[in-house]
């Protein structure tokens, strides 16, 4: 046996406060099912209500698992299937749903309260491109220092911006002052 000096711990020991991470299973399987009776469904099975122990034996005779798929039903619904294959299918479905979910992109366009016409038109052209690509546009006027006294200029600028973009997008949120920024949200118009 090795002797350790000072504060050193043996390499295989776990320090105080070590917690092993336990992965929680989303479904109850076989002996973990607590209901006294369950409705059993599955291939080669007569759909009916059975005592849980009988249902587990039926699943084991086929070399499969009894999985509780609807615990809130009365009695709970269990399916006789291969649990590992079932988990794989569920993960695959979740990935598919995530991939098909549309991601919203928000592009920001910044103005100053004294933005001139050339800059305004330049930023307007970018906003048109963003809206045509399907992205939302967050246009804002940033007030620096004492320029906060020109709040009306910022609001007029944003409303002019929204009016110039009415063919390409619709206003989701009217100009709103938050701190030193006045912002407005525009969403692309639905394609016909």
Image: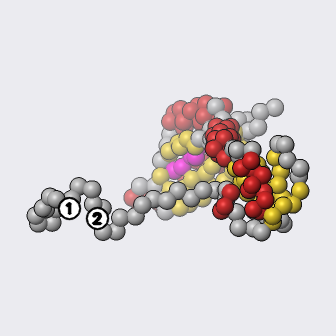
Vertical arrangement, residue 9 with respect to residue 121, above or below:
below
Secondary structure, mark 2, is loop
Q: CA distance from mark 2 to mark 1?
A: 8 Å
Q: Is residue 123 magenta?
A: no
Q: Nearer the viewer, residue 34 or 109?
A: 34
Q: Are marks 2 and 1 in contact (CB under 8 Å)?
A: yes
Residue 153 in view: no
Q: Nearer the viewer, residue 24 or 124?
A: 24
Which x, y percent locates residue 100? 68, 37
Residue at horizontal 39 percent and vertical 58 percent from the top: 145
Which x, y percent locates residue 160? 64, 44
Which x, y percent locates residue 170? 72, 44
* Left or right: residue 47 compared with residue 159: right
Magenta residues, dominant SS class:
strand
Residue at horizontal 74 percent and vertical 56 percent from the top: 56
* Left or right: residue 182 compared with residue 59: left
Give the mark, 2 or 1, whose residue is nearer the N terminus: 1
Q: Nearer the viewer, residue 53 or 22?
A: 53
User: Magenta residues?
Assistant: 136-141
Name the quadrant of the C terminus: top right
User: In the picture, residue 117 is in which quadrant?
Assistant: top right
Which residue does the numbered mark 1 point to in the structure image?
A: 9
Vertical arrangement, residue 111 with respect to residue 74, above or below:
above
Which residue does the numbered mark 2 point to in the structure image?
A: 15
């Amino acid at each position: 046996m090795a002797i350790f000096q000072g504060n050193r711990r043996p390499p295989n020991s776990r320090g105080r406060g070590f917690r092993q991470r336990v992965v929680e299973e989303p479904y109850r399987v076989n002996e973990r099912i607590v209901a006294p009776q369950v409705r059993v469904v599955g291939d080669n099975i007569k759909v009916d209500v059975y005592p849980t122990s009988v249902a587990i034996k039926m699943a084991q005779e086929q070399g499969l698992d009894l999985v509780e798929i609807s615990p809130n039903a009365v009695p709970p619904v269990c399916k006789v299937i291969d649990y590992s294959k079932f988990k794989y299918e569920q993960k695959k479905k979740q990935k598919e749903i995530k991939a098909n979910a549309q991601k919203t992109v928000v592009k920001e366009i910044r103005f100053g309260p004294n933005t001139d016409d050339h800059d305004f038109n330049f930023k307007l052209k970018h906003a048109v491109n963003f809206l045509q690509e399907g992205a939302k546009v967050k246009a804002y006027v940033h007030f620096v220092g004492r320029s906060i006294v020109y709040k009306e200029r910022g609001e007029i600028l944003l409303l002019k911006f929204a009016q110039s973009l009415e063919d390409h997008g619709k206003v989701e949120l009217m100009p709103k002052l938050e701190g030193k920024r006045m912002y407005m949200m525009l969403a692309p118009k639905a394609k016909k």
